[in-house]
Amino acid sequence: MRNVVFLLLLTCLTGVLSAQGAEIRKRSIGFETEGFALDMQTQIQFRLTFQEELAQSGQGGTNGRDFINFNLPRVRLRLNGHIFDDNFQYRLRLNFSRPAAELLEIAHFRYALMRPLNFNAGQDKLPWNWEEPVDSLDLSFQERSYVNEVFNQDYAKGVWLDGEIGDQNAPWVKYWFGVYGGLLRAQDDFRNKDGQLTTDAFSDVIDAEIMVNIRIETHPLGRVARGMVDLRDETENDKILFAIGAGFNWFSSGMNNADLRLDTAAAATGSGRSRVQQETYAVTLDGHFRFWGIAVDAAVYWRYTDFHNRGINKYTPADKQGIGDVEDFGWSFEASWVTPWLPLSVGVRVNSLDADEFWGANAALLQTDQHQRAIRPDAMEIGVTASYRLHGERLKFSLDILYVDQQLAYTYDGSGFLLGVYNEPQNRRGSIGSSPANADHDALWIVRLQVQWIL
């Protein structure tokens, strides 16, 4: 498969370079003929990561899971353009750093009927919040924030509408509305993650899932480009811009996790379908400001998951060992500045997660008398970044320094580990029987050095 894709890349590159009218653009190579246009870009990021885990030094703590690693987080090929005429638009993106089943990131076809109404189909980043769909070329930090990684809806397959109303350069309303298949990320992570190739066969995650998503934005003073930096040139960046957006997402699917929600029936169903259904409602509100190379982005997130019995399941969460719902809240703030004197940008980041805690009991753990069980820890992330654009985005050197503090809870399933972003922190007890006062926090220092080049 990878050899076929590589040959496709070579074929496309040869065609572009030999085509009449081919040109080197700001971030890509492209050409256009009657009835066809192609814009091609290859992006490579080479990164050194140092991560130190500390502050979990009590009995059974995990202080010492430190590492240094070289990696290629993104090796991407992008193909964008139109066929027949500019109403029929396409986007294709491959990432050779991902597993084979997730090699294809974007396969998106768009029929641009008119500004207020356009039709889309395929796979793309879900336009629910602002930060997640931002291209990695337009991030301030090398990776998106901790809280975004907890709330984002990843890639999605489906059909959707988009459009904008108002002035061409300052739309009062931009919207996206779609219906998607939805793919449960994990049996204890009730979000969509549909960025892999799947088969047309019934399974725990290929059933009757459905996801509905809507996002609305307003750009009253001028269009704010999707990104976390203000990359406008000096002739434009003296104009103040701001935008406000909101997103709503509803995702329903089956789930099968007896440690969270029991099935009272004695035997499994003949089909293998679980007797528990989850419904997750997610809401986000965000604001964005741009002026003189300064970019400020802020967002709040709220998510509520409700569990339902289906079939002959009669489970009730009436006692302390049960769980009826999970509610999470988070917020993020990020600011960056592209200096006018040097091709240098700097930025800061602060974001926080308040993960739900609940009652619970497990054979491997003592029952708690307070809401101390959780799926993931509460967390606070603080970071600084600097990037030197030697040749714009075509050759960029970046440094990120992050501090992450995770306040630990007891695991709900006795596994000993919570669901994290940069690691899997141990639960509040470092080991069974140790004092609950030990290993109460898991803190991380993360330093990343990266070089990016675009061909």
Image: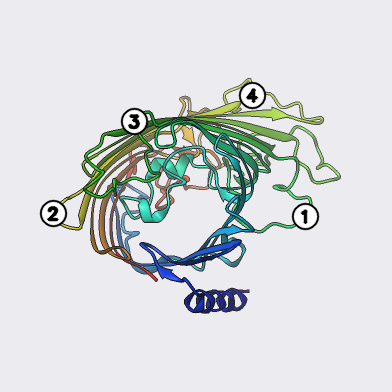
Q: Which residue is mark 3?
A: 221
In the rendered image, the vertical position of residue 53 relative to residue 261, given as above or below:
below
For label 2, the SS is loop
Q: CA distance from mark 2 to mark 1?
A: 55 Å
Compared to residue 403, the image places residue 33 above or below, namely: below
Measure the C-alpha gap from mark 3 to mark 2.
26 Å
Relative placement, left or right, of 42 versus 304 is: left
Given the current orientation, which residue lies at the most extreme right position? 270
In the picture provided, is 264 more to the left or to the right than 225?
right
Label 3: state its secondary structure. loop
The crowding category of the residue bearing disc 1, from other C-alpha atoms within 10 Å (few below 14, some 14 to 19, many at least 20), is: few
The residue closer to the viewer here, 308 or 249, is 249
Above or below residue 128? Residue 5 is below
Residue at disc 4, secondary structure: loop
Where the C terminus falls, by quadrant? bottom left
Kind of residue indicated by mark 4:
Pro
Indicate which disc, 4 or 3, sits on the residue closer to the N terminus.
Answer: 3
N-terminal of the pair, mark 4 or mark 1, is: 1
Q: CA distance from mark 1 to mark 3?
A: 47 Å
